[in-house]
Image (cartoon, rainbow, N blue to C red):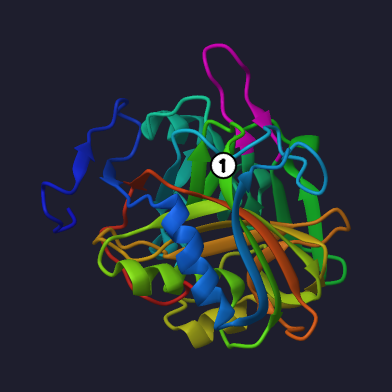
Amino acid sequence: MPTTPAAEVRIQQPRHRSTPHANNRPLQQRGGKDRAVLQKGLKENFADVQVSIVDCPDLTKEPFTFPVKGICGKTRIADVGGVPYLLPLVNQKKVYDLNKIAKEIQLPGAFILGAGAGPFQTLGFNSEFMPVIQTESEHKPPVNGSYFARVNPADGGCLLEKYSEKYHDFGFALLANLFASEGQPGKVIEVQAKRRTGKLNFVTCMRQTLEKHYGDKPVGMGGTFVIQKGKVKTHIMPAEFSSCPLNSDEEVNKWLRFYEMKAPLVCLPVFVSRDPGFDLRLEHTHCFSHHGEGGHYHYDTTPDTVEYLGYFSPAEFLYRIDQPKKTHSFGRD
């Protein structure tokens, strides 16, 4: 149990015996103030920056093609499982269902996006997972717009596929960082950033900017951004889990497969400025495209030409689900 003040954390008991224990904490929400804070922080890392409060664009349209129009309404972040279930050795008992996660965060029918490990229990192999799901509710069936990326067994390249074209479940495995909402239109934070001049990637710059400003008061955000121009470094986990224990970032990086992928890429970021004691992965971003590339986003490799355009919504609550009892700090880049 995390040692955080009882007044600041509300503990949720699972409604179903099969659902992992969840911790719940309210997050800071200062939409208008966040705009000014991000504008100042991003200018230290990018040559051209414009942060605005705008109406969320219609996310059912390209390049997003989400099953809902927006990312607003009862916003939540859920950190499910964790890297310790993947490393040093995989724990194949750790499998999850996004429809159940939506109920656990008290938002059945939620629209969920983010970054996680693919459902090996269905696929038969390990992969990078890009959840884009309208979960089931009493009135509507679920819609799965997710993608997964695997190492192509034929040539070692990237093989990106739309999940629902072959599979009909709503599972994932081991770990995920998820942003959930009612999927409604509304006001969002629009971030435009061009020509990176600093060392931080786009997401890290935003997260550290908020951490610097808010200190020990955690702020969480999620949404989507498009890398409109440039190229980025990504990775995809191998299809086979490591049979040898991986005990350091160096060993993990030797196991992963790295790629340089080209714009346009649609990214699904989830980040929290500071860990309130839940052993969080503070930021996690996966990406997909309509030209066959996708994976785990690290940073752009073309700082002089890169262009980002993103839409973000602050999260009202943070949920920690099935937190590993034994933890470590590697493998979280």
Q: Is residue 140 magenta?
A: yes
- Of residues 296 and 241, which is closer to you in this image? 296
Name the residue carrying label 1.
Answer: 187
For the point 44% across and 34% down, the residue is: 74
Residue 21 picture quarter:
top left
Judge from the rendering whether residue 240 lies leftward or rightward of residue 153; answer left or right: left
* Count of numbered circles in the view: 1
Task: In the displayed orientation, state which residue is furthest to the top.
Answer: 139
Residues drawn in magenta: 133-145
- Of residues 140 and 302, which is closer to you in this image? 302
Q: Position of residue 158 (x, y in %)?
A: 80, 65
Rate crowding at label 1 as few (under 14), some (14 to 19) or many (20 or more) other CA atoms within 10 Å: some
Q: Position of residue 27 (x, y in %)?
A: 32, 50
Task: In the displayed orientation, state which residue is furthest to the left.
Answer: 6
Type of amino acid at the residue the image marks with label 1:
Lys
Judge from the rendering whether residue 40 lies leftward or rightward of residue 170; answer left or right: left
For the point 73% across and 75% down, the residue is: 232
Does residue 314 sit above or below 236 in this rendering? above
Judge from the rendering whether residue 229 lies leftward or rightward of residue 240; answer left or right: right
Residue 103 picture quarter:
top left
Does residue 96 sit above or below 291 in this rendering? above
Does the magenta stretch mainly form a helix, a strand or a loop?
loop
**Residue 157 is at least partly visible in this image:** yes
Does residue 81 sit above or below 258 in this rendering? above
**Residue 88 is at least partly visible in this image:** no
For the point 65% across and 88% down, the residue is: 197
